[in-house]
Image (tube, rainbow, N blue to C red):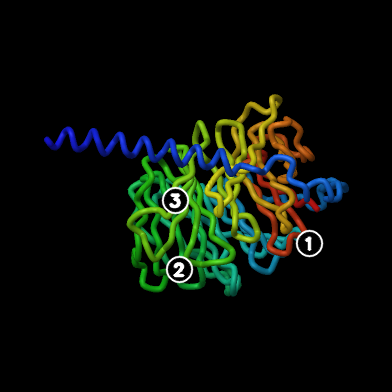
C-alpha cells in the first residue's frame, strides 16, 4: 500500500472515531430535566453598586482581585496600574507604566505582594508592592513575539502568560526564565484560568475558537481540546470546584463545559444580545455565571437553567461604555466590573 493510500485510510479511521465519539456524547447527554434542579431555591436580591472607583483617565482594560478579597488591581490605557482598597475606595498604589498600551493585569494570591501587567509591549512586567511607592518594575519577562493578552500568578515564584503569538509560557520570576511553552493553539491566545483544585492544570481560550485544558507536566500537547464556539473565545473561568469551566466568545454566547463528560453541558444565549462577550467569572457557589458584554452591561446567568431559553437572570446596568473586564472576589462577597468609561464598580 502506498503512503498516500495509508494516509487516506488513517483519515477515514479518524473520521469514523470522531463520529463514534460524537454519537456517544449524544447518547450520554442526560442533562435535560435534571431532577435536582427542581428543588433549588429561586435566586433573589440582584446585586447593586456599592462602590465606584474613580481615578483612571483612560479605558480600563483589565482587573484582578487580590487573595485577601479587599484589594483590586486595574490596568488602563492612561498608562497607570492602580491598586484599590475596595472597602474605602482609596488608592494604595498608582504605578506608572512604560507603555500605555496595557491589556492585562494580575495580583499574586498568597502573599499579595506582587502585581503584573502586559500588553502591546510584548512584556510581562512584575511589580513588588511591599514598599511605600512603586515606580518601576522589578522584573520584565521578555519572550513573546506578540502582545500579552493575559497573565496569572501560579505562586510567588511562577507566572503564566498568554499572547497573540499563539503561545502560553510558564515563567520563573526570580530567574527571569522561560520554563515551559505550550504551543498547540492556532490563533491568538486571549485568556487563561488556573484550576482551583490543582496548580498543575489550566485552561486557555483562543481566537481559533477552541479552549484547551493543559497539564504543566505534559507541555507538548493539551490534555483535551474543547470546540463549540463559532468565533474568538475572549475569556475562560473555572467553576469553583474545578470540574467545569465557562467561556465567553465573540459569537455572543457563553458556554459551560464539564471536564468529566468532556462536553458542553449548557449554552447561554439571548436573541436580544448580539454583541461580543469580553469576560466571564463564576459566583463562589457556581450558581451564577457573570459575563461582561459590549452592550455596556454585565449579564448574569443561572447555570442550572437552560441557557437557550433566552432569559438571563439579572442585568447589571451602570456603565456608560463597554464592560471590558469583571471578576468575583475570592470570598465571593462582591463582583467588580471595569469599563471603557474609565470606572470600576463594586457590586454586592
Which callout, 3 or 2, points at the residue further toward the start of the chain?
2
Q: CA distance from mark 3 to mark 2?
A: 24 Å
Q: Earlier in the sequence, mark 2 or mark 1?
A: 1
User: Residue 60 location, x and y as percent?
Assistant: 61, 45
For marks 3 and 1 on the same chain, the one whose residue lies earlier in the sequence: 1
Outermost residue to the left? 2
Crowd rating for badge 3 (residues with CA inside 10 Å; few <14, some 14–19, many 20+)? some
Q: Which residue is mark 1?
A: 88
Q: Quadrant of residue 179?
A: bottom left
- Name the side, left or right, on which 122 lies relative to 273: left
Residue 119 point in image, percent of width and height: 46, 48
Of residue 211 and residue 50, the one placed in the foreground of this image is 211
**What SS does tag 1 mark?**
loop
Secondary structure under tag 3 reads strand
Q: Which mark is residue 158?
A: 2
207 relative to 81, above or below: above
Judge whether 216 appears above or below 61 on screen: below
Looking at the image, is mark 3 or mark 1 nearer the viewer?
A: 3
Q: Is residue 293 above or below residue 257?
A: above
Q: Residues within 10 Å of mark 1 (few under 14, many from 20)?
A: few
Marks 2 & 1, CB-CB < 8 Å contact: no
Rendered image quadrant of residue 276: top right
Residue at 36 percent of width and 59 percent of height: 219
Say what secondary structure mark 2 lies in: strand
Amino acid at each position: 500500500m502506498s503512503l498516500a493510500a495509508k494516509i487516506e485510510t488513517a483519515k477515514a479511521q479518524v473520521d469514523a472515531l470522531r463520529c463514534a465519539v460524537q454519537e456517544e456524547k449524544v447518547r450520554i447527554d442526560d442533562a435535560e430535566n435534571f431532577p435536582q434542579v427542581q428543588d433549588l431555591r429561586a435566586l433573589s436580591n440582584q446585586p447593586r453598586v456599592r462602590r465606584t472607583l474613580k481615578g483612571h483617565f483612560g479605558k480600563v482594560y483589565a482587573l484582578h482581585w487580590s487573595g485577601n478579597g479587599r484589594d483590586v488591581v486595574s490596568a488602563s490605557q492612561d498608562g497607570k496600574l492602580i491598586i484599590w482598597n475596595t472597602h474605602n475606595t482609596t488608592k494604595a498604589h498608582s504605578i506608572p507604566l512604560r507603555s500605555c498600551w496595557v491589556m492585562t493585569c494580575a495580583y499574586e494570591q498568597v502573599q499579595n505582594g506582587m502585581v503584573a501587567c502586559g500588553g502591546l509591549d510584548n512584556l510581562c512586567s512584575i511589580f513588588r508592592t511591599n514598599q511605600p511607592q512603586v515606580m518601576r518594575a522589578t522584573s520584565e519577562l521578555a519572550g513573546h513575539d506578540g502582545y500579552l493578552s493575559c497573565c496569572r500568578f501560579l505562586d510567588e515564584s511562577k507566572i503564566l502568560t498568554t499572547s497573540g503569538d499563539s503561545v502560553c509560557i510558564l515563567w520563573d520570576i526570580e530567574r527571569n526564565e522561560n520554563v515551559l511553552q505550550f504551543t498547540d493553539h492556532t490563533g491568538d491566545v486571549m485568556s487563561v484560568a488556573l484550576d482551583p483544585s490543582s496548580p498543575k492544570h489550566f485552561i486557555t481560550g483562543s481566537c481559533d475558537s477552541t479552549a484547551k485544558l493543559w497539564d504543566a507536566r505534559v507541555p507538548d500537547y493539551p490534555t483535551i481540546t474543547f470546540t463549540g464556539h463559532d468565533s474568538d473565545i475572549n475569556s475562560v473561568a473555572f467553576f469553583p470546584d474545578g470540574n467545569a469551566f465557562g467561556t465567553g466568545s465573540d459569537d455572543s454566547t457563553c458556554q459551560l463545559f464539564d471536564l468529566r463528560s468532556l462536553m458542553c453541558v449548557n449554552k447561554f444565549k439571548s436573541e436580544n444580545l448580539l454583541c461580543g462577550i469580553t469576560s466571564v467569572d463564576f459566583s463562589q457557589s457556581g450558581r451564577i455565571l457573570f459575563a461582561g458584554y459590549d452592550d455596556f452591561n454585565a449579564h448574569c446567568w443561572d447555570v442550572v437553567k437552560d441557557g437557550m431559553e433566552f432569559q438571563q437572570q439579572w442585568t447589571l446596568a451602570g456603565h456608560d461604555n463597554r464592560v471590558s473586564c469583571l471578576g468575583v472576589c475570592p470570598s465571593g462577597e462582591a463582583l467588580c466590573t471595569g469599563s471603557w468609561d474609565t470606572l470600576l464598580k463594586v457590586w454586592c
